[in-house]
């Protein structure tokens, strides 16, 4: 279930991430959704959706980090 816009992201993502990080999450999720459509491309018994969420969070963590204030900030 790819996301068409940031407003369709899960609340746990939309409420936690700044707009640019939401863009990264959505694009990475949608790409992973397509890339891991075939079960043989995934590790273990994870669903396509679980895999796509993991990839999306990894993409966010590549450019953002959670600060001491418990909010996500761009890495310097």
Image (cartoon, helix red, strand yellow):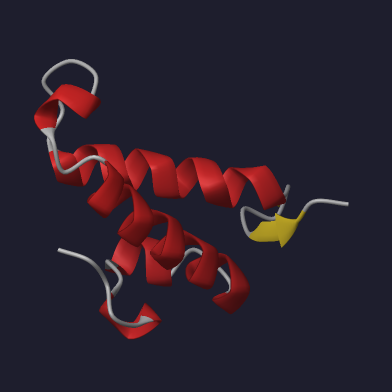
State the quadrant of the N terminus.
bottom left
The residue closer to the viewer here, 37 or 21, is 37
At a point 53% along the width and 63% down the height, the residue shown is 24
Residue 38 x/y as whole percent: 13, 36
Q: Can residue 59 be seen in this view?
A: yes
Say whether residue 65 is left or right of residue 9: right
**In this rendering, is residue 38 above or below 11?**
above
Q: In this view, does 13 lie to the left or right of 72?
A: left
The answer to whether 54 appears left or right of 21 in the picture is: left
User: Within the image, what quadrant is residue 29 found in?
Assistant: bottom left
Q: Where is residue 54 in the image (x, y as percent from the top left)?
A: 36, 39
Q: Residue at horizontal 69%, vertical 51%?
A: 63
Number of labelled discs?
0
Taking the image as drawn, is residue 66 in sight?
A: no
Is 26 on the left or on the right of 24, as rendered?
A: left
| 23 to 41, vertically: above or below | below
Q: Nearer the viewer, residue 48 or 34?
A: 34
What residue lies at 38% left-to-right and 79% top-to-bottom? 6
Residue 19 image-quadrant placement: bottom right
Instruction: Name the residue: 72% across, 59% down.
Output: 73
């Amino acid at each position: 279930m790819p996301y068409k816009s940031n407003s369709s992201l899960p609340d746990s993502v939309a409420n936690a991430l700044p707009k640019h990080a939401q863009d990264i999450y959505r694009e990475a999720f949608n790409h992973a959704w397509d890339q891991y459509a075939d079960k043989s491309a995934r590790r273990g018994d994870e669903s396509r959706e679980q895999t796509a969420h993991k990839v999306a969070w990894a993409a966010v963590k590549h450019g953002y980090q959670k600060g001491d204030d418990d909010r996500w900030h761009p890495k310097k």
